[in-house]
Amino acid sequence: MDIRLATLNDAESIAALNAEVQQVHADALPHLFKPPSDETFPASLVRQLLADPNTYIFIASADDVPVGYIYAQIIRRAETSLHYAWDRFYIHHISVNRAYQRHGVGQALIQAVVRDAKEHGIATIALDVWAMNTKARAFFAAQGFTVYQETMWLHLSGQE
């Protein structure tokens, strides 16, 4: 398996790899997530993200076939009267082809972000995970992630 920073040439593969994780979310929360299509995470958006110097997209390949990706971004917050300044890597997406799950691909992608965070002197990596996604929650916990904040909602029936 090979993990490397994605290039513009990887945009189509990354867009295609997103479909699997998008479908998981659409199946679980269809009122919130659209089913995967050419417009949900298009290659053109991937190219825009790759042009951002604070964005890091790593791609995993097995036998030169893309099998997963992780999209992370450096977030910088200035000091305010309420909190100190902080920098963190924020993981927006991780997706691994179902056939390659539980083979270390996701772990290797997380470790690529960990290495970059250390190289940038950033001590915190954060992400969001949906409460219904028990598989992802278990995976992230196994990688050492812990809950530091929770978001709650009150969904009013019939109100969108």
Image (tube, rainbow, N blue to C red):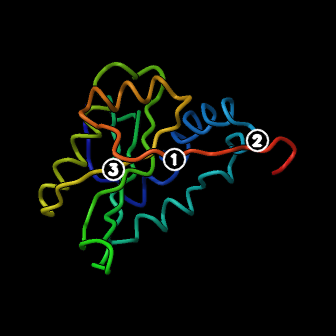
Residue 16 at x, y percent in the picture: 55, 42
Q: Secondary structure at mark 3?
A: strand
Residue 27 at x, y percent in the picture: 68, 30
Q: CA distance from mark 2 to mark 3?
A: 26 Å
Task: Of the two numbered discs 1 and 3 on the same chain, state the one appearing first in sequence.
Answer: 3
Q: Nearer the viewer, residue 159 or 59?
A: 159
Q: CA distance from mark 1 to mark 3?
A: 14 Å
Instruction: Identify the residue position indicated by label 2 in the image.
Output: 31
Q: Is residue 94 left or right of residue 41?
A: left
Between label 2 and label 1, give the one nearer the viewer: 1
Label 2 Cα neighbours within 10 Å, binned few <14 / some 14-19 / many ≥20: few
Tag shown at residue 118: none
Tag shown at residue 151: 1
> Which quadrant holds residue 137?
top left
Q: Secondary structure at mark 2?
A: loop
> Which quadrant holds residue 118?
bottom left
Which amino acid, by three-letter code, is at mark 1? Thr
Residue 23 at x, y percent in the picture: 63, 34
Task: Of the two numbered discs 2 and 1 on the same chain, state the one appearing first in sequence.
Answer: 2
Instruction: Identify the residue position indicated by label 3 in the image.
Output: 126
Which amino acid, by three-letter code, is at mark 3? Ala
Residue 79 at x, y percent in the picture: 27, 78
Q: Is residue 107 left or right of residue 13?
A: left
Task: Of the two numbered discs 2 and 3 on the same chain, state the one appearing first in sequence.
Answer: 2
Label 3 Cα neighbours within 10 Å, binned few <14 / some 14-19 / many ≥20: some
Query: Contact, CB < 8 Å: mark 1 with mark 3?
Result: no
Residue located 48% across and 47% down the image = 14
Residue located 29% across and 57% down the image = 89
Q: Nearer the viewer, residue 123 or 101?
A: 123
Which amino acid, by three-letter code, is at mark 2? His
